[in-house]
């Protein structure tokens, strides 16, 4: 093509790429090379890709191509998070089966992904709604059950009366309405399955600090959710005023045992188990006071309220260290099921206690003071008996020791996280693999009987609305007990939360066809962890937490041998926003075209997340028709850092479109220069050459650094490429098309390949050859070829892993003496290689590598 015919170019290359994906089998089992596993969070098959999808997939595709160009063994798989409620709703509306709707959407979205120009390993594709996948989801559930990490419990649940289902807390909004149906959520008691995530609270919390590749904000969100703390449980003796003796003990949980001399009251949850004892035999008016408080607490809707409490009569508590007597209150601000449900009140050092103490005129006693001695400030104890003058950390330690010694305390920990409620009273999900036998009780389905198959044909989809759909299917419910043979056994009819499906899919991809085991542990040893995981902020808490939990469980069971954490590096990409236009008078959202008919002051114009309901969505496929997929990709990535929100405005595309055109036109010039003069392009003189390649080296280095940064600064990389392009066009004006010029142009083409793969493939085919292999421009090669005279730089790999680089004499690569090479490597890289099988010397276009095997 002499014009930049993006549409035909893109079609041609998309066809090639997707034909060439035959089998990933070879690379999957090629475990000698260095691997790279990049993964975009798999989508729910809603039927249409939006700009947010395009943004994530472009991030993973750029990284996938970049890492491949650097010689790594890369996978970038894709699958479908295909169970869930929308399919059921759609099925009801259209009178079709949920599976039909789901698979049709998948087909459509897959075609759209191909049009984006992203290349996934389609032969590793998985579907959470298919038997070959959910068999293993059920298998995991059974392993959890066997390890006492799954249990059934009567629990109060959020009940959505419209969707007829239980909702997780996160699915209920601030107004107490369902995030899906909008119904007012009710409370209901139901027997539910839970997974005991709290069991791993400590390690889920503490291992976060090893995740250097995670954004700080996400780590903090995880920490906040888990709410792990280490503290002390302390026993205060409970005295009856009348009897003047100890009749019981009250145990409190504190993270600040160092403040124990500052305790001026105890605060117990208003519904603490001792409440009945405290209230027994009290006067009418006191009981009325308590009841009044209780009703107020229960009927409250606001979160921020004045603290209230009821002062317990006839009892007091005794501080185990100071011996002081303190009053007891039943209060609203202490939670019954956190810690012990009782708190030692230290108003001088705890804000909540202080607010309460001021309201009820309780004394405030300071026990920590700042002390300044020659420049350094430290916090020390005061008014604390023999512990006075100690610093906080030391005081905590000594006070804990003392409490343990006198039998009044022990060190413990707590998480504020709750166990994971996984039961859903829905049809389109994984059947929980459990039966209930009248004689034997609740039993896991034997592993060799898995999967418990979800009946694919519901027959009458109206049943979907009516309670728990599987309970209506007799053939499904009735079964025989595998232990006693009783025919009256019944299958569990709840299905699993779809977060269970997505809690382990990243482990299945490398071995997604395995029908004998969940996956081959040896393959996972090599492919785990995911090197780069990319997804949205909406999954920063729950999905990541559940995935980390299941991964840890499988690690402890030795199915995932080496790794405690599933995702080494995480990019949370920002939203794609655009202008929304709302008619002030009616509140109605207008399409941008309609909005033009109105005056500005008639409209409310905001920049918001693209969404159907706000009529401000921009369809990526329509943009591809206008300027091409390469242009869309570069535009989305050029807006700014991956993790920042971007505001789509339609203009930036034109800039990138013209940039791509310029790069295209330059290749036409080179092509015609080749034609006129064959190999006889003129050469630069030595001086010109050195000064030119010094600059080129700098540009390539900048591009590469931007790409290798933790946050993968694509926008910077593209800007640096544009500088390289500008440099090239100036060079062309000055000295025409030289051999060196076309060599530099090749660097540009290669560094642009991850960002504009169709266009660059077409250019490379025109200029070079049919099966052109893109490789990342090697900085050492540029240096060796153009900038160094007597020495060359060599990369040293040991077992294919990069260990460092050496400056050596050019003749070194020809030397035959392996011992000498090893000696030099050991000395300058501080390695200790004593045994090796082989030394492989590679010279790829002046990029020298010595690989010691
Ligand atoms: C005395 C104290 C003094 C406290 C001080 C704090 C500061 P985390 O980190 O969240 O575990 N607490 C304990 N159980 C509670 C409950 N059921 N409801 C409400 N608050 C409770 O916080 C532990 C701290 O929260 C504990 O340490 C306790 O107050 C309070 F200067 O004890 B502290
Ligand atoms: Zn039985």
Image (cartoon, rainbow, N blue to C red):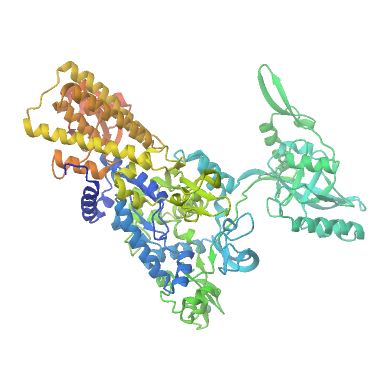
Q: In which quarter of the image is the C terminus?
A: top left
Image quadrant where one finds the N terminus: top left
Q: Residue at x 61, y 60 (%)?
A: 177
531 displayed left or right of 844: right
Left or right placement of residue 537 versus residue 717 in this view: right
| Residue 575 placement (x, y as % from top left) | 46, 45
Q: In this view, does 15 lie above or below 357?
A: below
Say which of 847 and 541 sits in front.
541
Query: Residue at the bottom extreme?
Result: 487
Image quadrant of residue 376? top right
Find residue 662 and report its horizontal and vertical position in percent: 24, 35
Q: In this view, does 105 lie above or below 4?
A: below
Q: In which quarter of the image is residue 386?
A: top right
* Placement of 91 over or under 54, stated as above or below: below
What residue is shown at x 36% (from left), y 66% (from top)?
103
Residue 747 spot, x, y in % from top left:
23, 32
Image quadrant of ligand 1 equals top right
Residue 231 coordinates in the image, percent (x, y): 66, 43
Q: Nearer the viewer, residue 239 or 504?
A: 504
């Amino acid at each position: 093509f002499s014009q930049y015919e993006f549409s035909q170019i893109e079609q041609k290359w998309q066809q090639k790429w997707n034909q060439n994906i035959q089998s990933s089998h070879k690379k999957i089992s090629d475990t000698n090379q260095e691997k790279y596993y990049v993964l975009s969070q798999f989508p729910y098959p809603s039927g249409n890709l939006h700009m947010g999808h395009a943004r994530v997939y472009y991030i993973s595709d750029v990284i996938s191509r970049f890492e491949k160009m650097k010689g790594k063994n890369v996978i970038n798989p894709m699958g479908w998070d295909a169970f869930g409620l929308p399919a059921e709703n759609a099925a009801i509306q259209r009178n079709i089966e949920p599976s039909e709707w789901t698979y049709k959407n998948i087909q459509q979205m897959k075609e759209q992904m191909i049009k984006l120009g992203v290349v996934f390993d389609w032969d590793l594709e998985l579907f959470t709604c298919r038997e070959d996948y959910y068999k293993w989801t059920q298998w995991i559930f059974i392993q959890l059950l066997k390890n006492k990490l799954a249990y059934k419990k009567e629990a109060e649940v959020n009940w959505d009366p419209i969707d007829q289902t239980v909702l997780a807390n996160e699915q209920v909004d601030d107004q107490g309405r369902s995030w899906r149906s909008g119904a007012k959520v009710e409370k209901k008691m139901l027997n539910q399955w839970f997974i005991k995530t709290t069991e791993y609270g400590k390690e889920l919390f503490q291992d976060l600090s090893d995740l250097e590749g995670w954004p700080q904000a996400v780590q903090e969100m995880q920490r906040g959710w888990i709410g792990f703390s280490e503290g002390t449980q302390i026993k205060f003796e409970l005295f009856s005023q009348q009897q003047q003796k100890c009749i019981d003990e009250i145990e409190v949980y504190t993270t600040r045992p160092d403040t124990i001399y500052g305790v001026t009251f105890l605060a117990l949850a208003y519904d603490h188990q001792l409440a009945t004892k405290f209230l027994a035999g009290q006067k009418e008016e006191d009981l009325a006071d308590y009841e009044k408080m209780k009703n107020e607490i229960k009927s409250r809707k606001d979160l921020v309220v004045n603290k209230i409490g009821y002062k317990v009569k006839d009892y007091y508590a005794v501080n185990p260290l100071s011996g002081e007597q303190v009053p007891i209150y039943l209060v609203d601000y202490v939670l019954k099921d956190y810690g012990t449900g009782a708190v030692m009140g230290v108003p001088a050092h705890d804000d909540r206690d202080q607010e309460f103490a001021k309201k009820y005129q309780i004394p405030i006693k300071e026990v920590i003071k700042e002390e300044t001695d020659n420049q350094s400030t430290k916090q020390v104890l005061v008014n604390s008996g023999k512990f006075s003058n100690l610093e906080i950390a030391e005081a905590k330690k000594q006070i804990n020791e003392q409490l343990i010694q006198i039998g009044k305390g022990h060190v413990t920990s707590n998480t504020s996280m709750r166990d994971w409620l996984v039961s859903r009273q829905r049809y389109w999900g994984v059947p929980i693999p459990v039966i209930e036998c009248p004689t034997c009780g609740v039993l896991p389905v034997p592993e060799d009987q898995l999967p418990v198959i979800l009946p694919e044909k519901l027959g009458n989809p109206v049943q979907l609305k009516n309670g728990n759909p599987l309970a209506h299917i007799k053939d499904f419910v009735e079964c025989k007990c595998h232990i006693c043979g009783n025919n009256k056994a019944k299958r569990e009819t709840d299905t699993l939360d779809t977060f269970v499906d997505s809690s382990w899919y990243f482990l299945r991809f490398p071995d997604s066809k395995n029908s004998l085991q969940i996956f081959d542990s040896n393959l996972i040893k090599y492919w785990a962890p995911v090197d780069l995981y990319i997804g949205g902020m909406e999954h920063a808490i729950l999905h990541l937490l559940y995935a980390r939990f299941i991964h840890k469980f499988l690690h402890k069971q030795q199915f995932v041998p080496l790794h405690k954490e599933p995702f080494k590096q995480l990019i949370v990409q920002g939203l794609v926003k655009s202008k929304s236009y709302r008619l002030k008078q009616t509140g109605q959202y207008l399409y941008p075209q309609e909005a033009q008919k109105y005056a500005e002051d008639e409209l409310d114009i905001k920049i918001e997340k693209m969404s159907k309901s706000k009529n401000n969505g921009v369809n990526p496929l329509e943009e591809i028709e206008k300027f091409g997929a390469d242009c869309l990709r570069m535009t989305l990535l050029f807006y700014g850092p991956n993790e920042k929100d971007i505001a789509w405005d339609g203009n930036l595309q034109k800039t990138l479109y013209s940039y791509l055109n310029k790069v295209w036109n330059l290749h036409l010039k080179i092509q015609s220069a080749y034609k006129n003069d064959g190999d006889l392009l003129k050469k630069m003189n030595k001086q010109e050459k050195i000064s030119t390649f010094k600059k080129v080296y700098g540009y390539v280095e900048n591009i590469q650094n931007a790409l290798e940064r933790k946050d993968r600064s694509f926008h910077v990389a593209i800007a640096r490429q544009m500088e390289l392009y500008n440099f090239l066009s100036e060079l062309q004006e000055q000295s025409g098309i030289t051999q060196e010029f076309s060599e530099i142009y090749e660097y540009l083409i290669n560094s642009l390949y991850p960002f504009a793969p169709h266009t660059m493939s077409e250019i490379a085919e025109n200029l070079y050859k049919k099966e052109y292999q893109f490789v990342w421009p090697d900085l050492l090669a540029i240096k060796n070829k153009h900038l160094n005279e007597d020495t060359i730089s060599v990369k040293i790999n040991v077992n294919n892993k990069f260990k460092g680089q050496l400056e050596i004499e050019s003749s070194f690569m020809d030397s035959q003496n392996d011992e000498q090479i090893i000696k030099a490597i050991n000395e300058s890289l501080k390695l200790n290689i004593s045994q090796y099988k082989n030394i492989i010397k590679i010279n790829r276009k002046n990029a020298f590598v010595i690989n010691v095997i």
